[in-house]
Image (spheres, helix red, strand yellow):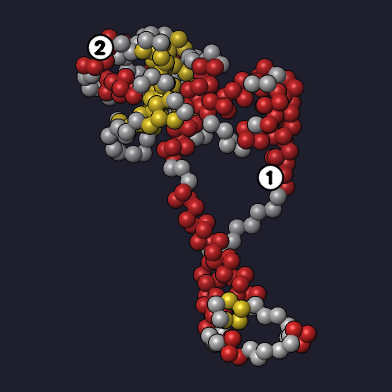
Amino acid sequence: MNCKEVINLMDGYLDSELDPVTSQTVEQHLRDCPNCDRIYKAHGSLMRAIASASPYHKAPAGLRERIQSSLREEIAEQPIRDVSSEMPLRPLSKQSEPRTVFFGTQWNWLALAAAIIVAAIITFNLVPRLRPGGDQLLATQLIASHVRSLMASHLTDVASTDQHTVKPWFNGKLPFSPPVPDPAAQGFPLIGGRLDYVENHPVAALVYQHRKHFINLFIWPSTRTSSTAKEPRTQQGYNTIHWNQGGMEYWSVSDMNQGDLGDFVQLVRGGSSPSSSR
């Protein structure tokens, strides 16, 4: 990716609108190109300055009800009339001042403004339903972390195939002790571990390998009680499987096929997976 392409994508990168792969490609270019990195930092500073200087006022909780009440009262005060029968035919040169008519009812600007605001409130309440779910956004973030670890050659902070070396390494670095499964005998050897950062909190990232594919297993404490693994999810050519177990939340991310990733997850969860030996 050249400088011109990166500059064209700069706004999307700053707004986190790019897909994980493109975002990581831009990030790699910024690390290698001091000129583009200066432009990126300048744009970021400008955005933060504008955001911090912009006033923000939260509407009172009862605003919606008051607007709806005003709208109902306004409609009730305006009787429905047959406007066409009441409006005499006059020459164009003697027409009275124009009036705003809405479905046969004379509509003043206050009522129209109230209607627009109510419509905006309704739209605002409906929009979140059309946005991606929390799990989808989290999966995107974890895929980006997976890709970044491969591109930056920073798969591990502690490189070891011994779970008794990797697990103690996290002591004092995390407010929890992550389990470190070791399904090496079934073809998924442990490579090491590292610290990562997800949704504004630190997490453990365990790294495994299967043939030529790497797996990032992200772990952090969970408030959920269900231990059922969710269906595999595919985004941008990467597969993810998410589940909760033993008070921990697990996300596995890899570019290998869903079947092999499913075998890995079954082994990590403590089950047997005959297909993993193929």
Q: Say which quarter of the image contains residue 242.
A: top left
Residue behind mark 1: 51
Q: Amino acid at mark 1?
A: Ala
Distance from disc 1 to disc 2, alpha carbons, whole Å, reads 54 Å
Residue in the image at 58% along x and 28% along y: 23
Q: Is residue 168 visible in the rendered structure shown here?
A: no
Q: Helix, strand, or loop for circle 1?
A: helix
Residue 110's tag is none
* Amino acid at dot 2: Ser
Which residue does the numbered mark 2 point to in the structure image?
277
Quarter in which the N terminus is drawn = top right
Q: Is residue 112 above or below residue 152?
A: below
Q: Quadrant of residue 11?
A: top right
Using the image, determine if residue 247 lies above or below residue 169.
Answer: below
Q: Residue at x 54, y 13 (%)?
A: 153
Q: Residues within 10 Å of mark 2 (few under 14, many from 20)?
A: few
Can I make out residue 151 in this image?
A: yes
